[in-house]
Image: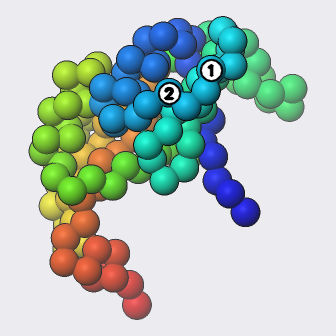
Amino acid sequence: MDLLVNVDVDDLEKAVRFYSAAFGLRIGRRFGAVGVEMLGSSAPIYLLVKEAGTPAADTTSQVRSYARHWTPTHLDFVVEEIEGAVREAVRAGARLEKPIATHRWGKLALMADPFGHGFCFVQFLGRGYDEIAS
């Protein structure tokens, strides 16, 4: 089974600029005005145009909002050096929502992209998650 990631955005070109500058991703393919495949991560990331205020699904009354929102699913980008990754992402338009925290397993930065989606930078230290695995 392969994994790919879809990220809804309301401004495709702004999203391409952000995901290129913040994460070093590059355009793989364009799907007209409705989507772009971004490559350079362990899974392709598809930026898909969905207008704000449109229904998220037929089974819910929730609508898309590109203000900061929370969801239990988010992207974690594993980096070699977290401080530089945070600086680059903030320069590209991300928000650092909590100062970088150091844990036994590594460092974590809680962030948000310009479309309100949460993401994290993770820098593993020592044995990474194995430091806390039982």
On the picture, is 83 further left or further right than 110? left
25 or 48: which is nearer to us?
25
Give residue 94's quadrant in the image: top left
Which residue is at 37% across, 27% downward?
Answer: 20
* Secondary structure under the numbered disc 2 in the rendered image: strand
Residue 64 shows up from this direction: no
Establish if 75 lies above or below 46.
below
* Secondary structure under the numbered disc 1 in the rendered image: strand
Which numbered marker is on residue 11?
A: none
Quarter of the figure that contains the N terminus: bottom right
Cβ atoms under marks 1 and 2 closer than 8 Å: yes
Residue 40, horizontal then vertical, whole percent = 44, 43
Quarter of the figure that contains the C terminus: bottom left
On the picture, is 41 further left or further right than 34? left
42 or 86: which is nearer to us?
42
Residue 101, horizontal then vertical, whole percent = 17, 54
Residue 29 shows up from this direction: yes
The amino acid type, in three-letter code, at marker 2 is: Ile
Which residue is at 19% across, 22% downward?
Answer: 91
Which residue is labeled 2 in the image?
Answer: 27
Residue lying farthest to the right in this orientation: 58
Establish if 1 lies above or below 3.
below
Residue 90, horizontal then vertical, whole percent = 22, 26
